[in-house]
């Protein structure tokens, strides 16, 4: 198990441990981070790791990005969407620096990420997600598929799969936060190839962004789940397109 996988596997349990210790509402808001900073001195080492995990998840909830690993520092980092122009953050370093201080640095960091991402009203989360993927796709393409012709054609699905298997080493990476930026861009592109070629419209629920009313039989497809299958099954994206087209 690599270091980032180990960190991510323990993230939820550590956050729960921290939440049990602090006893106030932890809703990933800047206010909750301000309250957290005030009690950092009272937390033990494991609870502080939970605070770092919570800070990272709160930043990712405020703006697009993904968990990464700083090999030189041997610590997890949160890496924002390159389109936001923000530097990566080491949550552990931020928690260490904030302990014993009353400078509001954790809340200010959260506000900086939220401001860079722009309005993210709950009622328009799908529209905001779609707008971010479309406007950010040139940066995504330059990062993961420079020189690739991203023309939303069926043929481009083979190129998408090549990029997928070059970028992702396991199915878990598409859903556990390590490759959130890549996963969102790839899911949007695959969904747009389907929508533009076969019709349909975007929807979302608690768990997934998906396409509804695709093809002549008005099917439903969850792009990220198709990407998961394609990691180990070459040709899967094109096969699913053909299936929905019939």
Image (cartoon, rainbow, N blue to C red):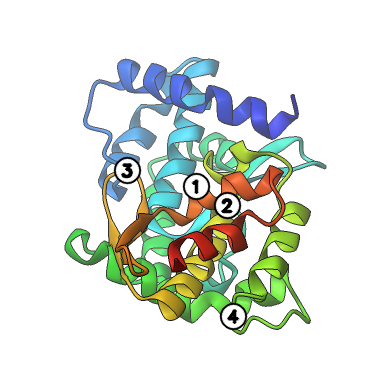
Quadrant (top left/top right/bottom left/bottom right) for the N terminus: top right
Q: Do the residues labelled 2 and 1 touch (CB within 8 Å)?
A: yes
Q: Residue at x 57, y 52 (%)?
A: 227
The tag earlier along the polypeptide, 2 or 3, is 3
Q: Of tags 4 and 2, which is closer to the observer? A: 4
Tell me the distance, in whole angstroms, between the alpha carbons under discs 4 and 1.
20 Å
User: In the rendering, at what x and y percent does residue 100 appear?
Assistant: 46, 32
Q: Hey, which quadrant is residue 72 in on the image?
A: top right
Mark 4 or 3, which is nearer the eye? Answer: 4
> Going from the N terminus, do you reach mark 4 or mark 3 first?
3
Number of residues whose C-alpha sits closer than 10 Å to that of mark 4, classed few (under 14), some (14–19) or many (20 or more): some
Mark 2: secondary structure: helix
For residue 73, which quarter of the picture? top right
Q: Distance between the residues labelled 4 and 2?
A: 17 Å
**Residue 104 seen in the current view:** no
> What residue sits right under mark 2 in the picture?
227
Residue 28 got which mark?
3
The answer for how far apart the CA atoms under marks 3 and 1 are is 27 Å
Mark 3 or 1 closer to N-term?
Answer: 3
Which residue is rendered at x = 54% and y = 17% of the image? 45
Q: In the rendered image, which residue does mark 4 sit on?
A: 153
């Amino acid at each position: 198990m690599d270091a980032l996988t180990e960190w991510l596997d323990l993230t939820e349990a550590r956050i729960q441990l921290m939440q049990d210790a602090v006893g106030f509402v932890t809703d990933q808001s800047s206010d909750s981070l301000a309250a957290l900073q005030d009690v950092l001195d009272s937390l033990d080492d494991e609870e502080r790791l939970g605070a770092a995990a919570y800070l990272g998840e709160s930043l990712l909830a405020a703006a697009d990005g993904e968990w990464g690993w700083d090999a030189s520092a041997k610590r997890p980092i949160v890496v924002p969407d390159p389109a936001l122009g923000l530097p990566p953050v080491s949550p552990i370093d931020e928690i260490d620096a904030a302990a014993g201080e009353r400078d509001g640095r954790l809340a200010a960091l959260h506000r900086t990420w939220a401001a860079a991402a722009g309005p993210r009203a709950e009622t328009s989360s799908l529209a905001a997600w779609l707008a971010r993927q479309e406007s950010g796709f040139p940066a995504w393409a330059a990062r993961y598929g420079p020189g690739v012709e991203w023309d939303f054609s069926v043929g481009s699905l083979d190129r998408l799969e090549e990029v997928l298997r070059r970028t992702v080493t396991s199915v878990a990476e598409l859903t556990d936060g390590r490759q959130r930026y890549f996963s969102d861009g790839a899911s949007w592109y695959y969904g747009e190839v389907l929508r533009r070629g076969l019709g349909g419209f975007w929807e979302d629920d608690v768990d997934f962004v998906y396409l509804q009313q695709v093809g002549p039989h008005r099917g439903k497809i969850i792009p990220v789940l198709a990407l998961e299958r394609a990691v180990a099954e070459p040709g899967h994206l094109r096969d699913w397109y053909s299936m929905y087209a019939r």
